[in-house]
Image: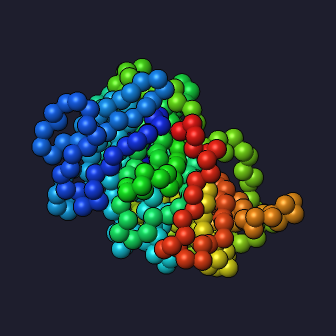
Amino acid sequence: MVPLITAASACSLHNVMLPSQNYGTKKGIKCGTNLGQGFGMKRACCGGLQIKANSQNYNGDDKFSRVFSTSSIRQNFTIRAYEVDANGIASIETLMNYFQHSITYHCKTLGVHDDVAGSTKEMIKRNLVWVYSEMQVSTYRYPKWDDAVEVETWLSTAGMNAVRFNWIVRDFKTNQMLNRASSISVLMNKLTRRLSKIPEEVRREFESYLVNSRIIIKDGDKKIPKLDDTTADYICTGLRPRWSDLDINFHVNNAKYVSWILESIPQSILMNYELSAMSLKFKRECNRDSKLQSLAEVCSDKNNNNSDNNIECNHMLRFEDGVEILRGRTQWRPKPTNNFDIFNHVPEDSIKDL
């Protein structure tokens, strides 16, 4: 389980002029208004409404430039050398950290939280924090070192006692969608470590930013089987959190869970395939003194229906005593022959309504 924060509306962006990659000041789309030096205009369509937001670009080593709107917020990130994996592309852990950072900053921009954990004033009074209960990620292409990406976030409804955080990652230069992700988040009491209903006082602090947007990834209802010593093909033991793996709520950060499930993937898959999709269901939190095991089942060939050479794996993280922490499913596609040249375009039917 992982701490989270807040965001706003699902928008399908069209004809967007992005700032230059050097983050210098540039004029944006002309809208018949004198915007002033250093400010641009971004335009987006959200349903039948057109939403405009001023953007200001910053020089210097500020890792992102910021765009503000009442529906969604975007941040720009440059892929650093320490954020890439052995293939020279951004690691999945890097993307997970971008997701968490951008949603935290989104809440700060909206003025609905009072601390780095994303807690509102009423949440702080009640010792409540956001945690993930499940998450889905779909990846079409991984950015490489020194690429600039734009991460858009928004917050949508997910029942009475949960909210859904949403992300789309786009190529900063071309506006091509690279990744999309969605999570369901619930409240946890920091003192009792138990899940909590959303108090009405807390709901009133952010409900004006909730939108009824379509679910951008629909894999969440597919059942993930529970693994054990007899059904798992690979088991990695002896996993332990480090002090640096803990977040401000003194439990393990969500990106570390992803690292652990990848520990049980055989090297032959890691060397020849790349992660294309992931679905995680968090069962309980993990703290500094935990000892864990990572189980994986490679199940793509069991139905003899693998004409595209993709691989699917089921995962489970558990404590050494067998208590379940997380279930997951990963999908893998053959690596491009050259990660620096091949561009995996997003299928048209998967993005037309985003």
Q: Is residue 55 above or below residue 269?
A: above
Q: Residue at x 46, y 75 (%)?
A: 88
Q: Is residue 259 visible?
A: yes
Q: Position of residue 291 (x, y in %)?
A: 55, 66
Left or right: residue 240 versus residue 296 is left
Marks counted in the figure total: 0
Q: Residue 114 versus residue 273: which sits nearer the camera?
A: 273
Q: Give the color scheme: rainbow, by chain, secondary structure or one colour.
A: rainbow
Left or right: residue 198 versus residue 261 is left
Find the residue positioned furthest to the right: 304
Choose top left, top right, bottom left or bottom right for residue 227: bottom right
Q: Residue at x 45, y 29 (%)?
A: 46
Q: Position of residue 83 (x, y in %)?
A: 39, 69
Q: Residue 150 versus residue 249: which sits nearer the camera?
A: 150
Q: Is residue 142 above or below residue 57?
A: below
Q: Is residue 129 visible?
A: no
Q: Position of residue 23 (x, y in %)?
A: 23, 57
Q: Position of residue 90 (x, y in %)?
A: 45, 67
Left or right: residue 103 versus residue 224 is left
Left or right: residue 226 versus residue 247 is right
Q: Residue at x 48, y 41 (%)?
A: 166
Q: Is residue 138 above or below residue 68?
A: below
Q: Residue at x 48, y 31 (%)?
A: 156
